[in-house]
Image: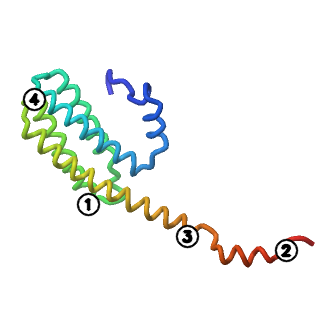
Amino acid sequence: MGGMTDPGADNPYLRDAVLTASPEQLQLMLYDGAIRFTVQGREAIEKKDFETSCERLTRAQHIVLEMHSGLNHDVNPELCARMAGLYTFIYRKLIDANVNHDLQAFDDALKILRIERETWQMVVDKVSTERAAGAKEAEPNPECSASAGTLSVQG
């Protein structure tokens, strides 16, 4: 990504969070980053700090491109096509915001990013609940364990 530094290089907690995150959590982190950089870019435009705004929006654009390129069209082509359309829309709005200093373009991009982030949070919550339920089912049944204790493995 050009001259940008790795944010995890200076922050071991962030690096560890990324390295131990599930794919669902990583996607959520991407949404969080895109929203954060877009908000920062909007704030910089309001202050007429065009250099900072450009840098922040460029980071948000890179994240959106990463999400777009990460779509697996083999799994669900129809859903991926819709998501690709959303990511393209967001990306174009970020470009409009960056080039034209258009606050409405910022707001349009942020609205979609926030809706998608909220939707993704529901997916993460559902997957976490399902994993926890699966783990609970995999635990030994206490009633079975008690009866197994009466068996002897000694000769």
Q: CA distance from mark 4 to mark 2?
A: 76 Å
Q: Which of marks 1 and 3 precedes in the sequence?
A: 1
Q: Which of marks 1 and 4 precedes in the sequence?
A: 4
Q: Residues within 10 Å of mark 3 (few under 14, many from 20)?
A: few
Report the disc number at residue 78. 1
Q: CA distance from mark 4 to mark 3?
A: 53 Å
Between 128 and 89, the one lying in front of the other is 128
Circle 2: residue type: Ser
Q: CA distance from mark 4 to mark 1?
A: 38 Å
Between 130 and 70, the one lying in front of the other is 130
Residue visible at 11% across and 25% down in the picture: 47
Taking 63 as reference, is 22 above or below it?
below
Circle 1: residue type: Glu
Between 30 and 148, the one lying in front of the other is 148
Q: Which of marks 2 and 4 precedes in the sequence?
A: 4
- Give the x, y percent position of residue 32: 30, 42
Report the disc number at residue 137. 3
Q: Which of marks 2 and 1 precedes in the sequence?
A: 1
Q: How is the image coloured?
A: rainbow
